[in-house]
C-alpha cells in the first residue's frame, strides 16, 4: 500500500482540469468495444480477406489526413474544450446509429465517420494537456492521461469479445453512451482553460507567428523524427492487425475471445506498470526512453515468429509489448512538445499523427497482401527486420537530436 501511495503521489500537484480530462478518458475507454475488434468484424462478419482489410484501413487513414490537419488547425485557433465537445457529440451520434442498424459495410462506414470525428479532436486533447502543464510536469500529465485511458480498457476488450458473436449491436450502443458521458463531464467541469505563461514555456516552446512550413523548415530534424515515428507506428499497428489474424489462424473460433483477453492483459499491465515505469525512467531523457520502448515492442512482436498454438507465449509477449508501449507513450508527446512553439502544437501533433497513419496504413496493405500470398510466419520475420532497421536508424538520430536541442540535455 505504501509503495502504491508513493508511486501515485507523483501525479499530485497538476491543474484540476488535467484530472477532469483524465477521468473523462476513463469513462470513454470503458466503452471502447469496437475498434480492437474491427479487423475480426471485417473478416468474420463481412467476409473480407487480409488484403481487403488492409485496403479499407488504408482508405480510412487517407481520409483522416485532411481531417487531422483540420483538427490541428482548429486546436491552434479556437477554444479546445469547444472543439472536443463538438466532435465528441458527432462521434457519439455515429456510434449510436450503428447500434440500431443491421451490420453491413454501411455500418462500418458510419462507424469510421465517428472515428474520424474522434481522431480530429486528438490534437486539441493533446495540446490542451500541454497548455495546462509546464515542461517539467508534462511527462507526469501524459502518463496520467495514458493510465486513465487504460483503466477503462481493463474489461472493455474482453466484454467486446463476449458480445462479438451474438450481440455486436449492443457493443456499438455501449461505445456511444460511454463517449457521451465523457463529453458531459468535460462540458460541465472543464471551465478554466488558458494557455501557459511565458515563464512556464520551455526554451524551444516560445510562441512564433511564422507559418507552419516556416517553423518546420527551421526544425528539419523533426521531419526525420516523423519518419521514425511512422515506422514505429507501422510496427505497433500489428497489435490490432497481424496479431488478431495470427490468433484466428492458430485458435480458430476462439481467436476473437483470446485477442480480447490479450487486450485486457495489455490494459491491466498498463495500470500496474505506468506509474512504476514513469517513476523508474523519469530521470531519463525522453528520446532515450523512446529508444528503449521501441526495442521492447520489437522484441515482443518477434515472439510470434515462434508461436504456433502456445498461448502462454502470447501472454509473455503482450506483457513485454505493453512495457514498451508504456515507455513510448509517456515519452513521445512530451518529446515533441518540448521542441516546437506552443502556438503550433495542434498542427504539428496532427502532422505526426498523419504521417504515422499513412505509412502504417500503406504498410498494412502490404502486410495483408503478403499474408494472403505467403504466410503469417514469413510476414513476422519481415516485421522483425524492419524493427532492427528502425533501431539502427534511431541510434544515429539520438546523436543528431543532441546537437540540435542542446538546451534539453
Image: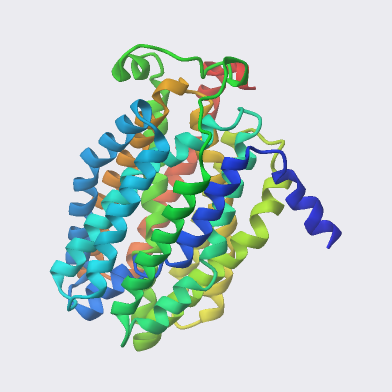
Q: Quadrant of the C terminus?
A: top right
Q: Position of residue 130 (x, y in %)?
A: 52, 33
Estimate the x, y position of residue 406 in percent, counting from the top left.
Answer: 59, 16
Residue 136 found in image quarter: top right
What's the residue at 27%, 35% (across, down)?
A: 69
Residue 212 falls left or right of residue 162: left
Coordinates of residue 243 in the picture (x, y in percent): 39, 69
Would you say 293 lies left or right of 45 here?
right
Considering depth in this image, is 403 or 33 the residue closer to the camera?
33
The answer to whether residue 113 shows anywhere in this view is yes
**Residue drawn at (17%, 62%), measured in percent from left and top?**
109
* Nearer to us in this view, 156 or 282: 156
Residue 174: image quadrant is bottom left
Q: Where is 401 relative to 83, above or below?
A: above
Work out whether residue 15 or residue 361 is closer to the camera in this orientation and state it: 15
Q: Residue furthest front?
A: 188
Above or below residue 30? Residue 225 is above
Q: From the viewer's perspective, is residue 113 above or below residue 123?
A: below
Q: Position of residue 192 (x, y in %)?
A: 53, 34
For residue 65, above or below residue 211: below
Residue 292 makes an appearance in the image: no
Tell me the residue at 74%/44% (across/down).
Answer: 10
Amino acid at each position: 500500500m505504501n509503495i502504491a501511495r508513493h508511486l501515485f503521489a507523483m501525479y499530485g500537484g497538476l491543474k484540476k482540469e488535467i484530472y477532469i480530462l483524465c477521468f473523462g478518458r476513463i469513462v470513454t475507454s470503458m466503452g471502447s468495444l469496437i475498434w480492437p475488434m474491427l479487423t475480426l468484424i471485417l473478416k468474420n462478419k463481412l467476409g473480407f480477406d487480409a488484403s481487403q482489410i488492409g485496403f479499407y484501413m488504408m482508405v480510412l487513414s487517407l481520409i483522416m489526413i485532411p481531417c487531422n490537419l483540420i483538427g490541428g488547425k482548429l486546436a491552434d485557433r479556437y477554444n479546445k474544450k469547444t472543439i472536443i465537445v463538438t466532435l465528441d457529440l458527432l462521434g457519439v451520434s455515429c456510434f449510436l446509429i450503428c447500434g440500431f442498424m443491421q451490420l453491413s459495410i454501411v455500418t462500418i462506414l458510419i462507424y469510421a465517420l465517428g472515428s474520424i470525428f474522434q481522431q480530429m479532436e486528438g490534437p486539441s486533447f493533446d495540446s490542451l494537456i500541454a497548455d495546462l502543464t509546464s515542461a517539467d510536469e508534462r511527462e507526469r500529465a501524459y502518463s496520467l492521461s495514458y493510465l486513465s485511458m487504460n483503466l477503462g480498457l481493463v474489461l472493455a476488450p474482453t466484454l467486446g469479445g463476449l458480445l462479438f458473436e451474438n450481440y455486436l449491436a449492443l457493443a456499438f450502443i455501449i461505445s456511444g453512451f460511454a463517449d457521451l458521458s465523457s463529453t458531459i463531464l468535460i462540458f460541465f467541469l472543464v471551465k478554466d482553460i488558458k494557455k501557459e505563461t511565458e515563464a512556464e514555456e520551455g526554451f524551444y516552446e516560445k510562441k512564433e507567428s511564422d507559418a507552419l512550413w516556416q517553423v518546420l523548415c527551421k526544425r528539419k530534424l523533426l521531419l526525420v523524427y516523423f519518419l521514425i515515428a511512422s515506422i514505429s507506428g507501422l510496427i505497433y499497428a500489428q497489435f490490432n492487425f497481424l496479431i488478431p489474424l495470427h490468433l484466428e489462424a492458430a485458435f480458430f473460433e476462439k481467436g476473437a475471445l483470446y485477442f480480447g483477453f490479450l487486450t485486457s492483459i495489455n490494459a491491466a499491465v498498463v495500470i500496474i506498470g505506468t506509474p512504476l515505469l514513469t517513476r523508474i525512467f523519469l530521470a531519463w531523457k525522453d528520446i532515450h526512453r523512446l529508444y528503449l520502448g521501441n526495442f521492447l515492442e520489437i522484441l515482443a512482436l518477434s515472439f510470434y515468429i515462434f508461436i504456433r498454438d502456445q498461448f502462454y507465449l502470447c501472454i509473455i509477449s503482450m506483457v513485454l509489448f505493453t512495457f514498451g508501449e508504456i515507455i513510448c507513450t509517456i515519452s513521445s508527446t512530451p518529446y515533441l512538445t518540448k521542441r516546437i512553439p506552443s502556438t503550433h502544437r495542434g498542427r504539428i501533433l496532427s502532422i505526426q499523427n498523419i504521417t504515422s497513419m499513412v505509412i502504417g496504413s500503406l504498410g498494412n496493405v502490404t502486410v495483408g497482401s503478403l499474408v494472403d500470398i505467403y504466410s503469417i510466419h514469413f510476414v513476422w520475420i519481415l516485421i522483425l527486420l524492419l524493427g532492427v532497421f528502425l533501431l539502427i536508424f534511431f541510434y544515429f538520430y539520438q546523436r543528431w537530436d543532441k546537437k540540435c536541442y542542446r538546451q534539453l540535455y
